Amino acid sequence: MTVRCEKLIPLPLLEQDISGSQVWDVDSVEFEQGKSYIIEAPSGKGKTSLLSVIYGIRNDYQGKVLLDDKPVSGFSWKDWSAHRKQHFSYIFQGLELFDSLSARDNILLKNSMTGFKTPGEIEEMARILGMEEFLHREAGILSFGQQQRVAIIRALCQPFHFLLADECFSHMDHENSRIAYQLIQQECQAQGAGFILTSLNEKANFRDSIRMKL
């Protein structure tokens, strides 16, 4: 699967200086399945907008977005629903967890719809991320970094061709970020999937990723 953006720019950025952007200030940019990308930019440059446009939850933009050369402008809500179920998983910047549910139930709620992971696989991902002993706690009382790890596990509980991640390591220390990134990369490799990560941190040291400036 490929995601191609042609002369794309969100409407809120029309009055900003976008010169030098490797996404907004180009005729075309393509994201290929199986490759990892880090989109780097300070706040307000459109990182969340880019992922939201690709995911189909924003349409306030100029230009075109094409999935496998098909313009998304012609997609119905059923088309988008199918794409989100089969092709895209998304780690939202706001995480979108249910605060009153336990971390485990937040994960299982997603997995109950997909049946993609076994209970043992979920427990193993939690162990790798250091979250095993926190799964019984309500998501709302966890630290934001812990909540990010819950959201990562949840996002991996479905098939996808691309994983979209909006600053999903922003509240983790270097070591936890490294471990979480490695887990994501392993899952992407297992599915032959692409990974598009937005980041405020230009010094984020993630190997084997194509870096792009907004």
Image (cartoon, rainbow, N blue to C red):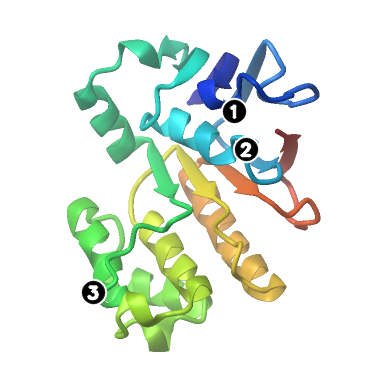
Nearer to the camera, 71 or 194: 71
Looking at this view, name the residue that lies furthest to the bottom.
133
Image x and y of residue 114, in percent: 23, 51
Image x and y of residue 157, in percent: 34, 57
Q: Mark 1 is on which residue type?
A: Phe
Q: Secondary structure at mark 3?
A: loop
The numbered mark, 2 or 3, whose residue comes first in the sequence reads: 2
Mark carried by residue 39: none
Image x and y of residue 174, in percent: 71, 71
Residue that badge 2 annotates = 35
> Measuring 45% from the left and 35% from the top, which residue is drawn there?
52
Image x and y of residue 105, in percent: 24, 72
Q: Mark 3 is on which residue type?
A: Leu
The numbered mark, 1 or 3, whose residue comes first in the sequence reads: 1
Residue that badge 1 annotates = 31
> Measuring 34% from the left and 76% from the top, which residue is drawn there?
140
Q: Secondary structure at mark 2?
A: loop
Residue mark closest to the camera, 1 vs 3: 3
Res 26 → quadrant: top right
Q: Residues under labels 2 and 3: Cα distance?
A: 34 Å
Say few, some or many: other residues with alpha carbon within 10 Å of mark 2 (under 14 / 14 to 19 / 20 or more).
some
Residue that badge 3 annotates = 101
Residue mark closest to the camera, 2 vs 3: 3
